[in-house]
Image: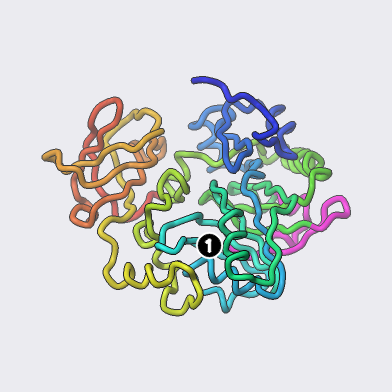
């Protein structure tokens, strides 16, 4: 495969020197930044993530900061999730939609204060949409991208490693909550969150000066824990049903099609720009929806394009958008969008890949 040509448009991160020293083998581009995808191999990284602890450069999870008297109003305009009861110190997974109810992003929102929020975004130029809403509705709020760079610590030994660097109090953070912790006399937001099902934290590093010092401190403190540089792992995220914006869902999909209806309080999310469209969807229900799909395969090619899904007679009934072979489960694991006529657990399917067609079936739950 062709290499990526570096340029100023493709931004490095405060941790790039550490990533390169750790032997990075592959990157992707995410929010105009480098995102590591492989260190040793996808399979080796997968096993290590489940057994030890990894440090991830996820600075590409850019923040949109919203601050000012209308910050809360703006946040509610962006999402069908009712945020009125959310308190400072809490995180929330918030589907963001346009006026048609189509997904624009699926970030984690952090409420820093009543008049200050961060939106930790997936891969899309969401900043322009937010600025457009502010301008169009003449809201009293400032919107920008702060110089904040998330660093994730993920895996079953994450608590032990974080306690050694930030003190045992960090272990008391509850899931989807955050606190302020000091490193090198600098206060940082630390949240119990992350793009894996193995548990861990995300550290929101302010500026560049503490990037490599924090990276080095985590590796020094975790030598006996088998700490290693890592990254979001394709196999593990599919097993856990963690969706990837741009892969598994786009603006063409509603939250209900993505299985995110539980994060939509459409009746009470007054002010959401997509509320009217989603009210119709919630009443009628989706005609297609994301489902876990088990594939009878011991090897699969990379899923860099949509794979057609048919019934056993060849009638198209959906599409696979992410797929890999799971070493732990001994089969192909996939995320797919399936029509309602064929989405019941146990339904037999065929998945068409560049290497041929494979028998498959709909599962009732994801693997992790």
Residue 133, located in which quarter of the rendered image? bottom right
Using residue 102 as the reference point, say whether residue 130 is left or right of it: right
- Frontmost residue, 213 versus 298: 213
How many tags in the picture?
A: 1
- In this rendering, the answer to whether 141 lies above or below 164 is below
Compared with 116, 240 (above or below) is above
Point out residue 150 in the picture as x, y percentages from the top left corner. 68, 49
- In reply to whether residue 172 is colored magenta, the answer given is yes
Whether residue 216 is situated above or below residue 243 in the rendered picture: above
Q: Which residue carries the number 1 mark?
A: 93
* Left or right of 147 on screen, residue 304: left
Q: Which of the two residues, 187 or 35, is positioned nearer the viewer here?
A: 35
Of 36 and 95, nearer the camera is 95
Helix, strand or loop status at disc 1: strand
Residue that protrudes farthest toward the right in the picture: 185
Let me know if residue 128 is in the magenta part: no
Q: Nearer the viewer, residue 208 or 170?
A: 208
The percent coordinates of residue 163 (x first, y second) are 74, 54
- x%, y% of residue 353? 29, 31
Quarter of image, res 51: top right
The structure's colour scheme is rainbow
Residue 245 in the image: state x and y as whole percent.
47, 48
Would you say residue 112 is visible in this rendering?
Answer: no
- The part of the chain drawn in magenta is 161-187
Q: Residue placed at 67% from the left, 41% from the top?
A: 225
Q: Residue at x 56, y 31 (%)?
A: 38
How many neighbours does mark 1 have within 10 angstroms: few (below 14), some (14-19), or many (20 or more)? some
- Would you say residue 45 is visible in this rendering? yes
Farthest residue, direction top: 2
Identify which residue is drawn at 51% across, 56% down.
106
């Amino acid at each position: 495969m062709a290499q990526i040509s570096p340029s100023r448009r493709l931004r490095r991160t405060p941790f790039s020197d550490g990533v390169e020293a750790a032997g990075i083998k592959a990157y992707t581009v995410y929010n105009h930044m480098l995102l590591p995808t492989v260190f040793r191999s996808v399979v080796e990284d997968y096993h290590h993530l489940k057994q030890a602890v990894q440090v991830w450069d996820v600075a590409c999870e850019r923040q949109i900061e919203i601050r000012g008297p209308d910050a809360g109003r703006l946040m509610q305009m962006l999402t069908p999730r009712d945020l009125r009861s959310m308190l400072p110190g809490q995180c929330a997974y918030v589907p963001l939609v346009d006026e048609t109810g189509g997904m624009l992003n699926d970030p984690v929102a952090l409420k820093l204060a009543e008049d200050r929020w961060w939106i930790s975004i997936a891969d899309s130029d969401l900043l322009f949409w937010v600025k457009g809403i502010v301008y169009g509705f003449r809201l009293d709020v400032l919107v920008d991208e702060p110089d904040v760079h998330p660093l994730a610590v993920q895996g079953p030994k994450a608590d032990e490693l974080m306690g050694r660097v930030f003190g045992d109090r960090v272990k008391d953070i509850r899931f989807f909550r955050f606190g302020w912790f000091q490193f090198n006399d600098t206060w940082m937001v630390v949240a119990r969150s992350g793009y894996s099902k193995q548990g861990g934290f995300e550290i929101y590093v302010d500026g560049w000066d503490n990037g490599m010092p924090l990276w080095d401190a985590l590796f020094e403190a975790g030598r006996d824990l088998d700490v290693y540089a890592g990254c979001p792992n394709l196999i593990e995220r599919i097993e856990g049903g963690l969706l990837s914006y741009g892969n598994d869902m786009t603006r063409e999909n509603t939250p209900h099609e993505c299985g995110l209806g539980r994060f939509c309080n459409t009746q009470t999310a007054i002010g959401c720009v997509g509320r009217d469209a989603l009210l119709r969807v919630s009443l009628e229900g989706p005609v297609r929806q994301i489902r876990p799909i088990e594939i009878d395969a011991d090897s699969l090619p990379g899923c860099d394009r949509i794979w057609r899904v048919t019934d056993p007679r060849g009638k198209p009934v959906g599409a696979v958008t992410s797929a890999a072979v799971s070493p732990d489960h001994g089969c192909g694991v996939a995320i797919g969008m399936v029509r309602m006529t064929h989405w019941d657990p146990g339904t037999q399917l065929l998945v068409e890949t560049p290497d041929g067609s494979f028998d498959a079936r709909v599962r009732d739950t994801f693997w992790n």
